[in-house]
Image (spheres, rainbow, N blue to C red):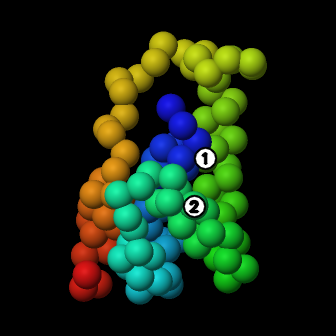
Amino acid sequence: MSFAEDNIRAFQQLITTEPLLFSKYEAELHQLAATFSDDIEKISDGVSNWCACESRPQILEALIKLHDDLDKARLPGTTKPIAPPPPPPPKVSRETLLNAIQESFPNQSK
């Protein structure tokens, strides 16, 4: 799994499990979603840049923590999890991220 895929999955997880982090950025989140291409690397870069904005430090901190938690769940020096692996996550795509945003914030138009 690439960093870009991990980054997008972590961002999706934040959107669905911590929607209050995004509540005052709902319109900006939809604007971000409108810029997504089909390129996973570009989506990940866009997400990272959006989260790194000085006005959204709590989102960046939560995203970094999710990455740290994922790294701690792996054996040192490997990419294998310490515990038995969970079922494979759904494929990461522009659509899966857009769906997470729409499901968490349905009141904003596309």
Q: Which of the 4 image quarters holds residue 88? A: top left
Residue 96 higher or lower than 102, as above or below: above
Q: Earlier in the sequence, mark 1 or mark 2?
A: 2
Residue 66 higher or lower than 20, as above or below: above
Residue that mark 1 sits on: 66
Q: Position of residue 74 (x, y in %)?
A: 64, 23
The residue under the point 69% across, 30% down is: 72
Query: Mark 1: which secondary structure?
Result: helix
Q: Quadrant of the C terminus?
A: bottom left
- Picture disc at residue 8: none
Depth-wise, is mark 1 or mark 2 nearer the camera?
2
How dense is the environment of label 1, judged by Cα within 10 Å: few (below 14), some, or many (20 and up)? some
Q: Which of the 4 image quarters holds residue 98? A: bottom left
Residue 88 higher or lower than 28, as above or below: above
Q: Position of residue 71 (x, y in %)?
A: 67, 33
Q: Which of the 4 image quarters holds residue 87? A: top left
The residue under the point 68% across, 52% down is: 64
Q: The disc labelled 1 sits on which kind of residue? A: Leu
